[in-house]
Amino acid sequence: MFLFFVVLLGVLFFQSSFSKIHVIEVSGNRLLTTEQIIEAAGIAVGDHFFAVSGEELDERVKRLGAAEQVNTVKSFPGVVKIVVKEYPVVALEITENGDIAGLLSNGASVPYGDVENAASRPILAGWDDPELKRRMTETLASIPPEMLQDVSEIRPSPTTGYPDRIVLYTRSHFEVLTRISYLTEKISLLDDYVYDMKNEDRTTGRIVLLETNYAETFETPEAEPGSGLSP
């Protein structure tokens, strides 16, 4: 009889509203919408509260590609809280439809939303190599945003000797030649070169940050390819 009543109570409980999800709360998201996260989690109000674990919900949301960390907390009765920490936005890009997307530190691209300080992020253009693009976003994530405020656009400019060579265009009207592998170390030199050139009344020009660092006007003849200093 005891077992019978235990089973009966169990059946009644799982058929009652107490075993259902009543509230789904999402926090921490800036790029991903609440609707996207709930849809990815695969749950809805009215679903069985015990049907899926919090760990499984975490993994489902991470598959969206924008969430670095997800922590789902289930509180009885019927409350599910999903806390999301997204990868930081390190750059922007223009999609084929002409829309603006945010590029995250893991290389993922997500529709642009109301992202804090997004206007100061450089635009990546011409990046057809996914692996090189991922290296670029990872490198940008390691650089303090204030060091990139003058950078408006970054394009790949590979050569045989420098497959990861890039060109940066600054808001102060200078071009900067460097490599992805050098950028973290060399970016701190950019402001000094811009300051010195402006003090010399040179309002535009090229700054080369490779094995050797120097600045030149655009009238300066280009070095021969393969010299290590070719623009």
Image: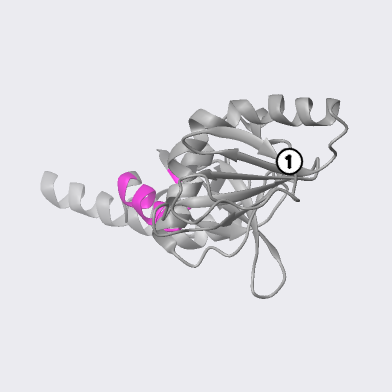
Q: Nearer the viewer, residue 224 or 123?
A: 224
Q: Up-down: is 219 above or below 117?
A: below
Q: Nearer the viewer, residue 178 or 151?
A: 178
Residue 78 visible in this rendered orientation of the protein: no
Going by the image, does 101 lie left or right of 210?
A: right
Percent coordinates x, y for residue 185 in the rendering: 49, 29
Which amino acid type is shown beneath numbered disc 1? Ser
Going by the image, does 207 lie left or right of 204?
A: left
Q: Residue at 49% x, 48% y: name it.
A: 136
Its colouring scheme is: one colour
Q: Quadrant of residue 130?
A: bottom left
Q: Residue at 52% x, 44% y: name it.
A: 229
Q: Quadrant of residue 173?
A: top right
Residue hosting label 1 = 120
Going by the image, does 160 lie left or right of 173?
A: left
Percent coordinates x, y for residue 47 in the rendering: 43, 60
Q: Let me know if residue 58 is in the magenta part.
A: yes
**Segment tinted magenta in the rendering:** 55-68
Q: Please, what secondary structure does the residue beneath circle 1 have? A: helix
Q: Residue furthest bottom?
A: 97
Q: Let me know if residue 125 is in the magenta part.
A: no
Percent coordinates x, y for residue 21 in the rendering: 47, 52
Q: Residue at 49% x, 67% y: name it.
A: 128
Going by the image, does 144 lie left or right of 7?
A: right
Q: Up-down: is 101 above or below 115?
A: below
